[in-house]
Image (spheres, grey):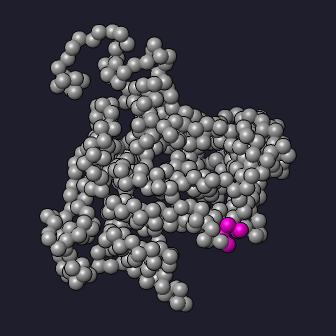
Amino acid sequence: MSEVLVRVGVELLDPRGRSPLQLAVCLGHLESARVLLRHGADLSRESQHGWTVLQEAVSTGDPELVQLVLQFRDYQRATERLGGIPELLSKLLKARDFYVEMKWEFTSWVPLVSKVCPSDVYRVWKSGSKLRVDTTLLGFEHMSWQKGRRSYIFKGGDEGAVVMELDHEKQVVYTETLSLSLQDPELLLSAVEPSEESVAQRLTAPIVSTHLDTKNIAFERNKSGIWGWRSEKSEAISGYEAKVYSATNVELVTRSRTEHLSDQDKNRSKGNKTPLQSFLGIAEQHTAHNGSHVTQCATPTNPTAITPEEYFNPSFNLQSRDIGRPLEITNKIQRFKATLWLCENHPLSLTEQVTPIIDLMAISNAHFAKLRDFITLKLPPGFPVKIEIPLFHVLNAQITFSNFCGCDDPVSSLTVSSPAQDSQEPAGGATAGASQGPSPPLMCEVDPSVFEIPPEYTAVGAGPSEPMRDEDDDLLQFAIQQSLLDAGTESEQVTIWEALTNTRPNSNPPPLEEDSQLER
């Protein structure tokens, strides 16, 4: 009971909407934050303005505080992952077995970028409480897309769950038994201790927060036809008739804070912006500050010298006075229109079969995390056989579900039983559009060998845990750089200005004054 009371007290909010941990971090009180974190204070809680505890810690400029918060943030993420996977596998156990392919295609509206955008096909096998996902696109690191053949195998059981990552190129397998990992919190905490380099990198870069704002989102059917005759649009996707919807008022909001940076770091951050970013409108919209002038008895984290009595008095009007360094915020808002292809008689269930898989992959994959955020919206009825959503500033993702139970291309590890085999109608005898209602679901049996490790592979224990990326600006820089570097051979490469003006290398475009260039 005492532990419960302590945990409740740790999460109580003060009159300004802050938890004790948020208050300690904003004031830069290192030891208070350490005690609260040791007692399980929640690091996932965001402030009223949408900032995480880690972001507030970075804003203080204190490397010890950032190191502490970052370590416990990764620890809490790891324990949530370890605790959540068995529950997700338990949900899958109740659903029908299946095989499906998820094709990811990345596109961009920026010239040349789409040519170098990667694509991947995730192959998914589900049998009982076992799941396997194959991929070739591993992620993004050091300004390049990471490719490789990997398989992720999840197995649920009475005593926990086992997660295996198979590296098919090195022929090694990393195995983690989740129930055992949960038994030693101190060992797990020490395993996620951040490096000095990662702490320094955060303290010398802007604090960036990117999220999809969907509070004003609206779905409407797309129309087709000409000459005044318009009908609701439908398309055949992977053999299924799908209604086409547009999601409007989708906003990608990016906020950057720089109050913790030195003048040198601020200048370097501004210098990192490429001319193309400015031309595309990916630039500062406005900068806001909180707080007023610093008084003599103030501290860097309490610049207006607010007393405890003033802070905790709900009737005291702080107005522009607040704790924490005065904010220096840059807001960037881009509006997108997402597209959905929804099939009302698809055999897959979004909530029972697909959502648990996306939740599993979202633990360590930022792309799946953004997809999860979108599909958890209240969508129109039907299964989203195809989705096109914005991922980053200049990149869209188009996800298509296909080859369900190997109905398009045979899969050797599947045994498929078609409902047509038990009816008078021969298999494949029905014509497109002739069915009078939802067709009976395909049934498939997955070969158990799919979830086994090849004998020639070497088991090397648990693999290194890679935390999910917090910022997306590196991907924007990458997309722009790749559009210039990988547009062709060395002799065919173009500059930013040549791409914008549609002139070839070595040509001599007429000189233009700066204002005219900016207008173009």
Q: Position of residue 301 (x, y in %)?
A: 27, 68
Q: Quadrant of the C terminus?
A: top left
160 in the magenta segment: no
Determine whether 148 is above or below 254 in the image: above
- Give percent across and percent down for residue 231: 45, 36
Quadrant of res 457: top right
Q: Would you identify the image quadrant in which residue 31 lies? A: bottom left
Given residues 135 and 292, the one toward you in this image is: 292
User: Outermost residue, top direction?
Assistant: 507
Which residue, as the protein is rendered here, is positioned at the far bottom? 1
Q: Residue at x 68, y 43 (%)?
A: 150
Q: How many marks?
A: 0
Identify the residue at the far front of this view.
Answer: 196
Question: Is 234 above or below relative to 364?
Answer: above
Q: Is residue 475 visible?
A: yes
The x and y percentages for residue 168 are 73, 40
Q: Kindly identify the residue that appears in the image at 39 percent across and 72 percent down.
A: 30
| Residue 324 shown left or right of residue 362 in the figure | left
Q: With 365 as the anchor, is 212 left or right in this view?
A: left
Quadrant into which the N terminus falls: bottom right
144 or 392, which lies in front? 144
User: Does residue 341 appear in the picture of this structure?
Assistant: no
> What residue is at 74 percent from the left and 52 percent from the top?
460
**43 with respect to 131 (left or right):** left
- Residue at image position (71%, 68%) is 180
Could you say where residue 381 lies in the image, as x and y percent from the top left? 53, 52
Please state the extent of the stretch shown in magenta in the rendering. 179-183
The chief SS type of the magenta part is: helix
